[in-house]
Image (cartoon, rainbow, N blue to C red):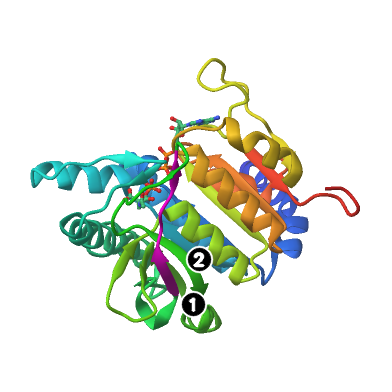
Amino acid sequence: MTPARKHTALPKAQILIEALPWLTRHNGKTVVIKFGGNAMVDDELKAAFAQDVVFLRQAGLKPVVVHGGGPQISAQLDKQGLVSEFKAGLRVTTPEAMDVVRMVLAGQVQRELVGLLNQHGPLAVGLTGEDAHTITAVQHRPTIDGELVDIGRVGEITAIDTGAIQALLDDGRIPVVSSIARSADDNHVYNVNADTAAAALAAALDAETLMVLTDVEGLYEDWPHSDDVISRLTATELEKLLPELSSGMVPKMQGCLHAVRNGVETARVIDGRVQHSILLEIFTDEGIGTMVVPDAQGES
Ligand SMILES: Nc1ncnc2c1ncn2[C@@H]1O[C@H](COP(=O)(O)OP(=O)(O)O)[C@@H](O)[C@H]1O
Ligand SMILES: CC(=O)N[C@@H](CCC(=O)OP(=O)(O)O)C(=O)O
């Protein structure tokens, strides 16, 4: 090897070797990654996301992707002249809107991500929560100002069957899940918030990590007045903060709390607009977003 090649090879080898403790720690572990619709900013970012997920798979982890698509659904509803309204952070979903939600999530967003992942080999398989009874739900009726409100075909998860996802993982595949659920009697399909679906899947799969990629750096301490990110908080600290949160952060942080209270070791909210944020989060010390951890033993 010429001295010049040695010069460039050494730093590369050092970078690889620095990842060794993380590779060892995460080997064989399941990681649920939620890719938010707002984080799917452009084609380059989506391609980088696919590379990261494939990298995790080739490094011996078991990634499961759950994707969102809120802005993409809103754009399609708009195009079809259907009104789009959110109550308690959830989309009011009429039967016509449900058709659009299903078409956009399963037919467009999921297909695109599966296609990007499969540019690296026959790895990704798409499914919705309807497939193999993966996600079962009942109609969700949120309480707003003390009253139960009907927001249409929005689902509250009652059961998760991890069989199909587990079989795909055992076969070395990367499941890509759309957040649509079925009712137990199979007469209805439901629109489920993708953060909620990702958290429920992470808990049911006994995942090591839930990673939520969004369009902010993490959970801001005093949003929208300051951009100080809370880098780490325990389940109890997060629980106290929940009533103060608004809009898209509510299902995200509720999901993180559910995950760490149900066996997931860490739940993280990170900036999906930063290329390769997943790799930084998993393989380095430079965690860049908000990390939620279970309470220390004896604390609650
Ligand atoms: N405390 C907070 N910290 C950060 N973002 C917040 C906070 N409270 C509300 N938000 C809003 O939540 C949004 C992220 O949620 P959402 O729009 O549902 O994204 P996604 O499509 O990734 O699920 C942010 O863009 C921000 O506008
Ligand atoms: C019930 C409900 O609100 N469902 C969401 C499902 C998609 C989603 O959650 O996408 P993001 O993660 O990109 O926000 C919706 O209809 O927008």
Which residue appears at 91% of the width and 52% of the height? 298
Q: Secondary structure at mark 2?
A: strand
Q: Can see residue 285?
A: yes
Q: Is the CB atom of the residue marked by disc 1 within 8 angstroms of ligand 2's nearest atom? A: no
The number of callouts visible is 2
Q: Circle 1 — which element?
A: helix
- The part of the image, by quadrant, that contains residue 117 is bottom left
Q: Which residue is mark 1?
A: 165
Residue furthest to the right in view is 298
Question: Residue shown at 19%/57% (left/top)?
Answer: 100
Q: Which residues are magenta?
A: 135-144
Tell me residue 241's x, y (percent): 65, 34
Distance between the Cα atoms at labels 1 and 2?
A: 8 Å
**Dot 1 surroundings within 10 Å: few (below 14), some, or many (20 or more)?**
many
Give the number of the disc on residue 64: 2
Question: Residue 274 location in percent, x, y?
Answer: 48, 37
